[in-house]
Amino acid sequence: MSWWAIDVRPPAAERDAVGAWLVARTGQAIEERDDGTLVTFAADEAGADRLLRELHERNGGVTVSRRPLDPVDWTTRWREGIAARRFGRLTVTPSWLAPPADGVTVVLDPESAFGSGEHGSTRAALSLLERHLRPGDRVTDLGSGSGILSIAAVKLGAAHAVGVELDPESNVVAARNAELNVVAGAVRFLEGDAAELAPLAGPADLVLSNILRTVNVRLIPAIAAGTRPGGLVVFSGMEEVEAPLFRPVLLDAGFAVEDEVTDAGWWGVAARRQ
């Protein structure tokens, strides 16, 4: 199978909307480059061509191109560049490295699923989770990907965690990672739309939503419905420049900002439901 990359250059004002459409259309995370380009992938040339046509039809004004990728053994390529990461008392490490002797360790093999601790948005969410999770908390993790946040929550002392993810392949990886960390009995991964499942998974003491800003905005009513009064929500997946756009939305929805983290240009915020 020869994979193709699709490079999308939307107008700046439409970047978030186009990015959200790509995530919903492909069911996978996108690469966001500093020059404003959004990169997604297709399994073959025909799939790339279909996506190009849909982009032109549904998102006028975008500049789109496609390019073939060199054949890669993805069964091992995903390991490159992944190292152990420390977040306070929490360490995230891949299975082929020796875990540290102290603190709480999550052994994680992300494989093809999003969430290895290497991306700034995931690191911001992990930092806020480590700071604010309380023993016995009930946790909901929206856009759970590799399961990293759900698993970390349980290992930090949560009573249980429910991960919600659109991509069934990610849930397979997440379940395998939960087994690897001996927390499978306390973590459950559901496939479906977070807007529908977030209220059903609650009431949670702590909700994690590491998704694009436009999706976070759309999900706020469902997140509020799935969070107990006084509960905390960690929002991530947003660039630092988006913080002034998102804070007023939180206030209007009845949340109070308690803590913020920036990491490599990515911004995460912990907000209390009033």
Image: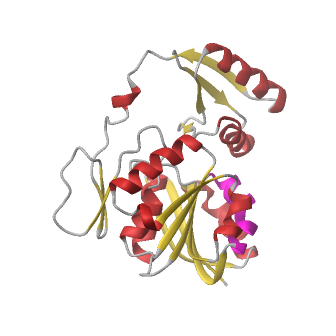
Main SS, magenta region, reads: helix
- Magenta span: 212-225
Relative to 166, 18 lies left or right: right
Image position, residue 230 (x, y; %)? 61, 85
Relative to 94, 208 lies left or right: right
* Above-or-below relation of 243 to 226: above
Name the image quarter holding residue 126.
bottom left
* Above-or-below relation of 32 to 61: below
* Above-or-below relation of 60 to 114: above
Asked if residue 80 shows in the view, the reply is yes
Q: Does the segment drawn in magenta span residue 78?
A: no
Relative to 17, 36 lies left or right: left
Image point (41%, 69%), residue name: 154
Asked if residue 262 shows in the view, the reply is no
Name the image quarter holding residue 70.
top left
Q: How is the image coloured?
A: secondary structure
Image position, residue 82 (x, y; %)? 31, 42
Name the image quarter holding residue 13.
top right
Image point (38%, 55%), residue name: 179
